[in-house]
Amino acid sequence: MSQILAVKITGATTLTLLNGNQLYTAIRKQAVPQVTLNTLGPIGDEVGDKTHHGGIDKAVFFNGQKTLEKLTALLGLEYDYLQDSRFGENFVVSELDEENVCVGDQFRIGEVLVEVCQPRKPCNTLSKNTENNDTRKVVVEQSLVGWYARVLQTGVIHQGDRLILLARPYPKLTIKAVHQLLAQPAKTLNTTLLEQALDCPSLAEGYKKTLRKQAEKNALHSDESAFFNTSEF
């Protein structure tokens, strides 16, 4: 059974990077023993870019232990992902990852009920924050994106709490499969899966908006994807 290995929050701050550039962000979250969640996310947590982050459909962000281990190795990062963050996750979980979590999954975690609502759409902040230009590319190409959830029932989550799966209405819409609808060339899309994703009431509307653009590219047999060869992100 999956378990909460780390709980993380932070306020937004300005980071000075090694090249002297500054980045206003809340991506480098720090571990705390527990957190109280409302429908907009953990109390005491902030986002730096309110245009693209935050809101009910991005209330909490999860990363799997296996995902973070892979990313740390692929990018040569040296930090303790159970105490610190380079990818902005609120929760690190055991057992779960992009291949066995689905859009629409509902998990009971302590007092809280959450519903998985979309994969992360990785932006260039990831590369800036890690100071590795390949970060976003690796995250996208390896489908190591993590997932957002909305909060259906508020309450407290503690480090060590179990994640109990209560419902899985869309077993074909894994986080990896839905992510790849945006990551691969539009002309190669699985149109059946694309239609299922667009019809899924649990999938965040912001994600559907980008999927509709992919569908338009698919109709034109385009080699482009939402992540590469376009200015989408």
Image (cartoon, grey):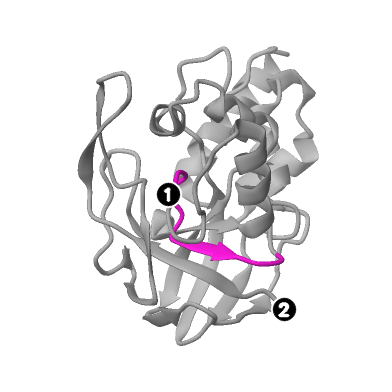
Q: Is residue 213 visible?
A: no
Q: Is residue 214 above or below residue 118?
A: above
Marked residue nearer the N-terminal end (2 or 1): 2
- On the image, the x and y values in percent for residue 26 come to 30, 47
What SS does tag 1 mark?
A: loop
Q: Name the quadrant of the N terminus.
A: bottom right
Relative to 122, 166 lies left or right: right
Q: Quadrant of the C terminus?
A: top left
Residue at the image position 70 percent from the left and 35 percent from the top: 142
The one of 169 and 22 positioned closer to us in this rendering: 22
Describe the element under mark 2 as helix, strand or loop.
loop
Q: Residue 137 placed where, x, y %?
A: 59, 25
- The span from disc 2 to disc 1 (Cα, nearest Å) is 24 Å
Task: Please give left or right for residue 8 compared with residue 79 in the image.
Answer: left
Q: Residue furthest bottom?
A: 111
Query: From which residue to which does the magenta span run?
Result: 85-95
Residue 169 makes an appearance in the image = yes
Q: In the depicted view, which residue is nearer to us: 136 or 160? A: 160
- Magenta includes 164? no
Q: Mark 2 — residue?
A: 1
User: Residue 44 in the image: x percent, y percent?
Assistant: 24, 66
Residue 88, magenta (yes or no)? yes
Within 10 Å of the Cα at label 2, are there few (<14), some (14-19), or many (20+) other Cα atoms? Answer: few
Q: Residue at 60% of width from left, 34% of height from top?
A: 76
Residue type at numbered disc 2: Met
Q: Amino acid at mark 1?
A: Gly
Circles 2, 1 touching at the beta carbon (< 8 Å): no
Q: Position of residue 179 (x, y in %)?
A: 64, 40
Nearest the eye: 156 or 228: 156
Identify the residue at image location x=79%, y=40%: 192
Residue bearing the label numbered 1: 88
- The correct choice, above or below, for 120 with respect to 200 in the image is above
